[in-house]
Amino acid sequence: MSLGVASSARPRPSAGAGPGAQAGQATVELLGVLPLLVALGLAAFQLLAVGYSSVLAGNAAEAGALALADGSGAAGARAGVRAALPGWSRARTRVTVDGGRVVVRLQPPSLLKVLAERLEITADASVEAL
């Protein structure tokens, strides 16, 4: 036993401890994190879709109320709502006209139909008689 003597001998690398032994580690770690990254990306897309659908529904409700104010009646208000929406959202829209109030319900785009139904956006606009 030698105390106080510094050894200059380096430990020998084992056969699997070379620089190439850990070359695949980053790939394996990326594959482990990839589902999380995909889920976060889809969640961000869904949030953006809900926000955009909210803006569309509000603008469409205002367009319907303006058509109603012009004296076009309920059919004109519905046509005004449909004209204010882009093509992809017209099939996802329900319009209700009750007196001077126009209610637009719009389902945002989603990969899951159940999620789109739960995230349905409602916007309304009304016209008051002067």
Image (cartoon, rainbow, N blue to C red):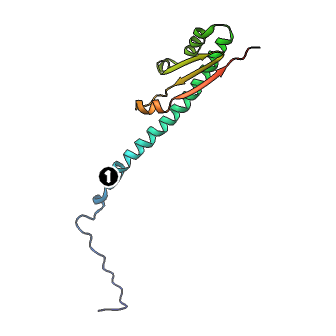
> Where is residue 115 shown, x and y percent of the image?
44, 33
Is residue 117 rendered to the left or right of residue 81? left
Dot 1, how many residues are within 10 Å of its Cα: few (below 14), some (14-19), or many (20+)?
A: few
User: Which quadrant is the N terminus positioned in?
Assistant: bottom left
Q: Residue furthest top?
A: 72
Give the amino acid type for the residue marked by disc 1 in the picture.
Val
The residue to which callout 1 is attached is: 28
Query: Which residue is at a point 54% across and 24% down the rendered structure image?
Result: 105
Q: Above or below — where is 129 with respect to 38?
A: above
> Where is residue 93 shown, x and y percent of the image?
51, 20
Query: Which residue is at a point 42% across and 42% down the rendered structure image?
Result: 39
Q: Residue furthest left?
A: 15
Look at the numbered disc 1 and give the secondary structure of its residue: helix
| Residue 15 image-quadrant placement | bottom left
Query: Which residue is at a point 40% across and 46% down the rendered structure image?
Result: 36
- Is residue 1 at all visible to an observer of this figure? yes
Instruction: Choose between 31 and 89: the one closer to the eye.
Output: 89
Q: Above or below — where is 19 with respect to 89?
A: below
Q: Above or below — where is 32 with respect to 59?
A: below
Query: Which residue is at a point 27% across and 65% down the rendered structure image?
Result: 17
Instruction: Choose between 62 and 1: the one closer to the eye.
Output: 62
